[in-house]
Structure formats: C-alpha cells, structure tokens
Image (tube, rainbow, N blue to C red):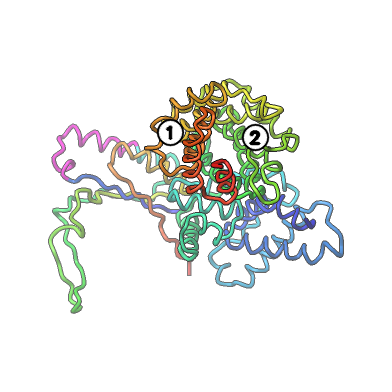
Amino acid sequence: MKYALLMYSVEKDWAEADEATREKVYAAHGRFSDLLRSRDAGRGGEELALTSAATTVRMTADGEALMTDGPYAETAEQLGGFYLVEARDLDEALEFARALAGVEDIIEVRPVVEHPSA
Amino acid sequence: MTSVEAAFHEHRGPLMATLVAELRSFDLAEEALQDAFAAATDQWPGEGVPRRPAAWLLSVARRRAVDRRRREQTLTRYLPLLITEEHTPAEFPARAADDSLGLLFACCHPSLGREARVALALRFVAGLTVPEIARLFLVPEATMAARITRAKQKIRAAGIPLRLPTPVDLPERVPGVRAVLYLLFTEGYRSFRDEVAGEAVRLTRLLHELRPTDAETASVLALMLLQHSRRRARLRDGRLVLLADQDRTQWNALDIAEALTLLEVRTPDEPYRLQAMIAARHAIAGRAEDTDWAAIARLYAQLEALTGSPVVRLNRAVAVLEADGPAAARDVIAGLEEQLPRNHHLWAARGEIALRLGDREAAAREFSRAAELAPTDTERDFLIKRAG
C-alpha cells in the first residue's frame, strides 16, 4: 500500500532556526531518505515553503474563486512537507513515521487511495 | 447441547480468525461462517457429525465465501480472491493459533480508538452481537453498530495488518492486547458467559505461549484461570453463590493446577500477580475456614501500596477482620465511607465489623444502608436478613 507521511511542525521554530539546527534537520532527512532507499520504499516527497508564501483559493457562495493570503487554517503547526512511501501495511508505514518522530513534531500517516486501473 | 452448538462453542473463535485472515473481510468471514453452521444444522443430524468438525466447517465456509464473492461482482473487482496458497485446509488447526492472535492484535491496534478496540474484540474475538455490546457500553444499538463499522472500515482502509506484529513492535503491543483480553474475561465472568470467558482464557494462553517470558501475561492468565475454575460452583439455581458457600469439589482442578504452576515462577509483584496470588490462596483452601486470611491481608496490603485503590483497602479490611478480628478491621476501614459512599460492600463490611464488636444497633443500621445500595435482589435479600 502507498501512504503519505504528512509532517506538521511549529512553523515559527523552523523560520527562526539557526544554521546549525537546519543542518541537523536536513541531515536527519538525508538519513531517512537512505532508509527508504534501502527498503525500496520511497515514492517521492518534498519540503514546502513557509505558509507566508501560501495563497488559498476557495469558491464563494456566489461561485467566485476567492483568493486570500496565507494558509487554509491559521494554526501554530503547519504542514511543512511530506513523503510518499510504499509499505506492506500500516505497521511498516508507522515504522517509517516513527523514524521521523525525533525530527518533526507531528507526522500524520494517511493511506493513499488506490484506484483500480481502468 | 447439540453437536452443532458444541462445535459452535469450541470452534467459532478460531474459525472466525482463520476466515478473516484468509478473506480479509470481517463481513464475508461472518456470513460464510454463519452459512457453514447453518449447513451443519441441516446435515449433521441426518448424516452424522464429521470426523473433524472444525475442518468440515472451515471448508464449507470457504466454499460459501467464494460463492458469495462471485455473486457480489462489485466486490470481486476490488478485493483479490484471497484463498491463498499459504492457507490450505491441512494446516487447520495448526495455523489457527497465529490467526487467532493476528485477529486479536488487529482489533487492538493502537491506531484504533480505545473504545473501538474493545468493541471490535467483543464482536469478532468473543462473538458477542452488536445489541449485546451496545448494552454493555450503555449506548444505543445504532451508535455501537456505527462505531464497529467505522473501525472495520479503518482496518481495511488504513492497511492494519491481520497478523502478529513484527518482533520489534511486539513488546509494546502486548500490554494493550492483554488489557483487552482481561476486559473480555471479566465481561464473560460477570455475565456468567463461560464461553466468552473461556475464549479470553484460550487467547491469553496463546499470548503467553508467544511470549513466555512476559511476566504480566503469565499473571493475567493465572488470575483468569483461578476465577474461571469456579464457573461450575458460583451459580446455583440461577443465583450467585458467594465464595465461602461454594462447593469446592466443583472447582476445576486442572485450571487451578495450571495457574499455580504459572505463579511458581518468581517474578516482580505487580497488580495482576498480587491479585492472582490472592485468588490462589482461596483456591488452595480445602474448606472456607482453612483460608489463610493473614496471608491474604498481607497481599492486599502490597496491592494497596501499589495501586492506592480504596476498593483494595476495603478488601484488605475484610481479610483483616478474618485474620485479626473486628478492632483491627475497624481501623483499616475507617474513612473509606468518604471515598466509597455508594459501595454496598463497604456498608456490608462495616455491618459485619459492628456485629463482631457486639454493637447490634450499629450493625443493623449499616446493613440497611448496604441493602438500599445493593444492585441485585440476591444481595439485597441477604443484607436485609443480616440487618435482622
């Protein structure tokens, strides 16, 4: 099964992190990518820019696309990046998520819907 | 009991587990198993009971599952036909232990909510119906049905495995499973459903065999066995028989022996072990008056130190009453009325203490209070008589 690992962190901490902290976090993600490679489990993933760069588009009641500055929800924790992984089952996906637990504050594990091939 | 009913009691749990593992569908497994038992009800009385009833039931259930899946074309598009090469009829019941534990671990997966875990285990491991589980949780049937459906869907959609966790994950998953098993057992015990309690014992034994070095699992198994050993003696004419009044020759000696062997292994004192040791003290007393109350009072004192529970202190007071007399017991029980004001056992114990101290007036007062709070007629009648 394919799973998305959605990583949420307190954005302010990351925005204000010093160079040494950033290097440590990137090194941890490098090791995580190595783990995925060794298990042939990596199916993609990205780091997202801060939500100060986000624009949210939503449909209004009158059918207009309304654009607003910023993320969909103003919370302290924001989606900061994701991985797509191939795992045998939820237990293996959770094993990957836990490997990230020291690096990211919150990791939500969501199965990816598999559409039957037409 | 007919041979089909006997087969149902003995094999329902393991067969359900194997079918869920093979078919990867709770609903299909349940329907197929119902079909198989219906077929047995039809055929066994005329044709005789097959030599291996479980294997017969399993192969009928498998055939019916294939039929049902063929009929339900939409299902077959999404679900692979999962009668796989790793499961052949010859392997039952050799694989049954793994399947049973696999189903149990799936129902107790930490990614499910606590209430959902217990409900799933009651439904699919112990075989209770949705209305029965709804009554236990004091929620409407529709609510419970929805909760179980959601949990089943999550198992499938999230990819929760229907097998044992990896050796790395296993140690941290065991305590949750153990807690659910003990809950299943107490539910079966409380409601006098021996087959539910028996299924909990069977699965706890499998868990113990899987991790024999896990001390708390051994303790839980011993505790269950000691309580389960009294199943024939604790009910007479539909009424609860108190421990002191039970016919001890009716206690199951094999269960007691198995429990005592488990307790012989010296392990640290934790709550399950202490409770099992207390139950064992009762189990080894040939007559109620041979009970070593001083030892029991000491064990309750240890348990109280670990848990701080007022109910444990109440039990200690009762043991102290038997071991050291009413004055000592009065000191132990003092103050508990603030913590357990509506516990009828507390007022009954206070009544007994007052009676032994020779204060009949106080005793009558305490027993009347206890009778007002007693939840069952049996206990109420008993307490009213005691109040004199």
Q: Which residue is mark 2?
A: B244
Q: Is residue A80 magenta?
A: no
| Quarter of the image that includes the N terminus of chain B | bottom right
Graded by Cα atoms within 10 Å as few (under 14), some (14 to 19) or many (20 or more), the crowding at tag 1 reads few
Q: Position of residue B204 (x, y in %)?
A: 60, 39
SS of the residue under disc 2: helix
Q: Which residue is mark 1?
A: B309
Q: Residue at x 33, y 39 (%)?
A: A101
Between B335 and B57, which is closer to the camera in this rendering?
A: B335
Q: Is residue B320 left or right of residue B41?
A: left
Q: Give, as a three-letter code, the residue at label 1.
A: Ser
Q: Is residue B11 left or right of residue B118?
A: right
Residue A65: give x, y in percent of width and height. 18, 73
Q: Main secondary structure of the magenta part?
A: helix
Whether residue B168 is visible to the viewer of this picture, yes or no, is no
Q: Which chain letter goes with mark 2?
A: B
Which chain is disc 1 placed on? Answer: B
Q: Is residue A23 magenta?
A: yes
First in sequence: mark 1 or mark 2? 2
Residue at (19%, 46%) from the top-left corner?
A11
Q: Is residue A117 above or below residue B119?
A: below
Horizontal relation, residue B153 to residue B18: left or right:
left
Occupied quadrant, residue B105: top right
| Residue B260 visible (yes or no) | yes
Q: How many marks?
A: 2
Q: Residues within 10 Å of mark 2 (few under 14, many from 20)?
A: few
Q: CA distance from mark 1 to mark 2?
A: 24 Å
Mark on residue A96? none
Highlighted range, magenta: A12-31
